[in-house]
Amino acid sequence: MAALNGTNQVVFAILATTLALVAIFLPVGFMGGIIGRFFESFAVVVTVGVLISYFVAVTLTPMLCSRYLRVQHDHGRLYTLFENGFLTMDRVYKRLLDAALRHRWVTVGLAVLLVLSSGWFFVHVGKAFTPQEDEGQFLIIVRTPLGSSIEYTDTRLRMVEQVLASEKSVRNYFTAIGLGGQGQVNQGFAFVRMYPRDERKERQQDLLPRLNKVLATIPGARAFATPVPMISGQRGDPLQFVVRGPQIDRVAQYAGRIRDRLLAEHPELGRVDLDLQLDLPQLVLDVDRARARSLGLDTFDVALAANVLAGGVDVAKYNDSPGDGERYDIRLKAAAGVLADVGDMRRIYLRNADGEMIRLDTVAHFEETIGPAVIGRYNLQYAANFYSTPNIALSAAVNIVREVAREELPLGYGVLMLGEAKEFEQTAGYVGFAFILATALVYMVLASQFNSFIQPIIIMVAQPLAIIGGLIALWLTGHTLNIFSMIGMILLIGLVAKNSILLVDLTNQYRARGMAIDEALREACPIRMRPVMMTSLTLILALMPAASGLGAGTDTVGPLAVAVIGGMISSTLLALVVVPVVYSLIETALERRARSKLSGVVSQIR
């Protein structure tokens, strides 16, 4: 009978809390963008888990209590210690609740001021797409001047290898030249893997800035370390943007100005890499068509001869083991060292239709010039790509770039964010939509459960009190507001509603027995204070390892844990006082309004 009575007392609060959590995570599962893919499975797991836990709580748990739970009257020292602590908390809370109910508007005013202060913390907390994570691996990109030979690039890459070999945190590395679609021999790459975190003292976030300072001293090349990209084939720098416009020369001019200003005025952005390759030394072949025709040659023959000897042409394929599916190109070109300079190109001989040998510089001449190695485009316009790993929050870095671009770029030219910066801007919209939708769904669920349009508002008073705690915790610990901490904020909507539901539900039960509003609050809230504290402490202690950086993956889930812990602490402490006060104010006003209407009706009848 005790198990049945206890279940009947809390079943409504459990159902309301369960449906509130389900209403929150359903919108999360339908979010768009990359964040939607991140948390789709998370939302499904939480929703299904909460529903199953509800059925366990109202069926299996009461049955087990009725069979195996025994109330002992003799307790040990540990029980006595905790019980005395809870009794002290009860006495302090009753006095605090009494004072709050006597000074209701003062309590509400202080709560409003506290919530308004969250604006300052929101502005000053860092914002990013994802938190900095110690993946134990990173890339090093090496660039030599355009036109450099593969041998020269190899000498610079070997200097990078010497730097890596001296690092105690580096376990192994792999270097290569000419990777990628363009296969440029002036670009080298190093794929670096570090020792596991428990076998090294230095974190990746600390190693990369120090390593970049050493790499900057390598002469004749630009070398820099960058995180491994989330998506293969892209750069891993958090800050990526393009300057685009209709004319490539002016794009290069404006991009150079922006880079110079960012480096000179904003060192907090760190290294700013401008990937604009427009100064490749080139030889332009100018054929004298009339002279070539008079000597029995045409333009195609001249161009083909120069192309075959200088660049090479694939003429056949080779298969060393027939049937294995592996075929290799056979490339025809001049032997290594034959064409060492422009003079060697001029001494190429061509055979005309009559079999005569004609020297190349008889019918053509070469002009040395500068031209683009790669022409970048974005949205059908010429583009210059920028990459940076800033030492400040990503949102602050984006604002700096936009401000400088606004001052430097004329009409028709603009700057667009890419990579994490672009995803962060989109994610803010997705999370904002999910937050609003979750709040609306929670309100509708609670309104249907409590059969009231007003009491859900009372319950949801605790949500702003949780947000301020989450922001303060992120600011104090130095974490950023990213996709994981944003999900933690959404999670708080349902978690803090649970505490308010427990308070309001039991208060309604006591009022149904004939108690006055404040009398019911003074009776119900101290009773529910203990389960509120116990459930909140359970969640806080469960998230403590992740928040303190213990274990694998804490760089990722740490911001989520910190946000939830901060929100639970603030909402639990404040909701125990603010929610009863708001309940008293609103319900007392409604009761007075109902009495005035009733008195008006009675006076009309008389």
Image (tube, rainbow, N blue to C red):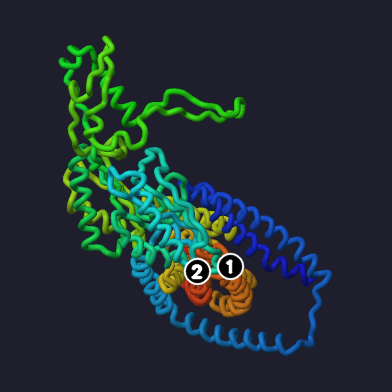
The local crowd at label 1, few if under 14, some if 14 to 19, many if 20 or more residues have their Cα within 10 Å, is few
Q: Residue 401, percent across and down?
A: 27, 55
CA gap, disc 1 and disc 2:
15 Å
Residue 507 at least partly seen:
no
The quarter of the displayed image where residue 127 is located: bottom left
Q: Nearer the viewer, residue 246 or 360?
A: 360
Report the mark closest to the observer, 1 or 2: 1
Neighbour tally class for label 2: few under 14, some 14-19, many 20 plus, Cα within 10 Å: many
Residue 595 pos. (x, y %): 49, 68
Residue drawn where x is 46% and y is 72% of the image: 585
Amino acid tagged 2: Val
Query: Mark 1 near mark 2, Cβ–Cβ under 8 Å?
Result: no
Q: Point out the residue furthest to the right here.
A: 67
**Residue 174 drawn above or below residue 571:** above
Q: Which residue is mark 2?
A: 562
- Locate residue 541 relative to residue 373 in the image: left or right: right
Q: Quadrant of the N terminus?
A: bottom right
Question: In the image, is 370 to the left or to the right of 590?
Answer: left
Sequence-earlier tag: 1 or 2:
1
The residue drawn where x is 77% and y is 69% is 3
What x and y, as percent, mark residue 542? 60, 70
**Which label is found at residue 527?**
none
Task: Name the residue: 51% across, 77% down.
Answer: 573
Secondary structure found at label 1: loop
| Of the pair 606 and 326, the residue shown nearer to us | 326
Compared across the picture, whether 313 is left or right of 438 comes to left
Give residue 63's position: percent from left, percent from top: 80, 65
Tell me the amino acid under the disc marked 1.
Gly
Secondary element at image label 2: helix
